[in-house]
Each structure stands twice: as structure tokens, then as C-alpha cells.
Amino acid sequence: MDLMRLMAPGRPLFAVLVGPHPQREALLDLIAALAFAGPVHVLDGGNHFDPIRIAYRIRAHTPDLMTYADRIRVVRAFTCVEVLRALQAQEAGPPLIIMDMLATFYDEAVSHRRSGLLVAECLQEIRRLKAPVLASVRNGQPADGPRAHLLQALVDAADLVDEPSERLAAPAELRLF
């Protein structure tokens, strides 16, 4: 999937990237690349944003780090309510990257019902933005049980879903002789 092309400003698209980890390296590359094109907003739901790695990625292309680093706005959310509030405060327009979106929604201190309602409200806010939004989610979270519907809600609402294929996830067969 060509993430840079998908996240072109002015293109209202909601894409979900599902994987065994929150796609951290690919997202950091994308954030740095988007900063060269203009402003980019990041909502970090799983504490995966690494400004040092972003700086290295920008520095690899230009000595003018500050010009491009200043185009990146990061909001860290430590609870699912903070994820919703950050989305409500988000302005329409710039591309938005949501890193590990559902990480805080699996908190046992939040009821199953409430977490589902908060995800639904987050999805309404994402649609309100009318901007390119890419959310990464772990597929290692409970596949069944009371919160299994959270990932399914994101997948159902997305315009595009990228999941690793079973073929790539299967270990290669070793031949000894």
C-alpha cells in the first residue's frame, strides 16, 4: 500500500492499518515524508511516537530539521476519553495519523459498553474531519470476547483496510536435506 499517496491532503479517506505491532516504523517514515509536503497531525494512542527517529528521517533529506519538524503536531492520549477529546479538538484539513488507536480502549477500568460507545464517537469525529486519516491497530488484541467488536467497528467504518496476509505471516518451512 502506498501510504504517501493515500494521505494526500484534501482527500477524505479513512484507512486502517492492522498488524501484529502498531506499524511504528512505517508510520514514522510516513510522518516524516508528510512533513515535507505540509502540516501533519499525529494522535499517539499507544505511546509509540519517537521524535528522535523522526528527526533522523528528516535529517537524512535536509539539514533544515526545524522547518519540517515544526510541521508535525503531536498529541498523546493516555486514556480512551483523551483519544476522543483529541479527535474533537482536531481541525479539518491536515492529514491525521493515529498510532495504535485502540490501545487505550482495552483498559479494564473502562466498561466494555463504554469503550464501544467511545469508539463509535471517535469514528463520527474522524468522518467530520473530511481529511485523510490513517489509524494503526494491533491485531494481537483479543480476537474474541467482550471487546472484539472494537476492531471490527474500525474495519467496518474504514474506506480501506490493510492487513498482513496469512501467507506472509506463516513461518517458512525449513528443509534440512
Image (cartoon, rainbow, N blue to C red):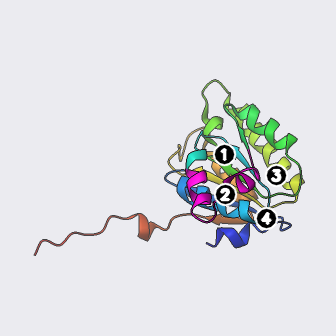
Residue linked to disc 2: 31
Q: Position of residue 7 (x, y in %)?
A: 74, 66
Q: Residues within 10 Å of mark 3 (few under 14, many from 20)?
A: many
Is residue 81 something one can see in this rendering?
yes
Res. 101 mark: 1
Image quadrant of residue 146? top right
Residue at image position (80%, 56%) is 39
Closest to the camera, between mark 3 and mark 2, is 2
Q: Please, is residue 153 above or below residue 33 in the view?
A: above
Q: Nearer the viewer, residue 119 or 20?
A: 20
Furthest residue in direction left, as rendered: 177
**Neighbour class for label 1 at 10 Å: few (<14), some, many (≥20)?**
many
Specify whether residue 63 is painted magenta. yes
Given residues 144 and 59, the one toward you in this image is 59
Q: Does 25 sit left or right of 122 as displayed?
A: left
Q: Is residue 67 left or right of residue 47?
A: right
Q: Position of residue 69 (x, y in %)?
A: 70, 52
Residues in magenta, as a range: 53-73
Q: Quadrant of residue 63?
A: bottom right
Residue at the image position 32 percent from the left and 64 percent from the top = 171
Q: Disc 1 residue type? A: Met
Q: CA distance from mark 2 to mark 1?
A: 16 Å
Check disc 2 and give the amino acid type.
Answer: Ile
Circle number at residue 126? 3
Cβ atoms under marks 1 and 3 closer than 8 Å:
no
At x 61%, y 30%, the residue is 107
Q: Quadrant of the C terminus?
A: bottom left
Query: Can residue 50 be spotted in the picture?
Result: no
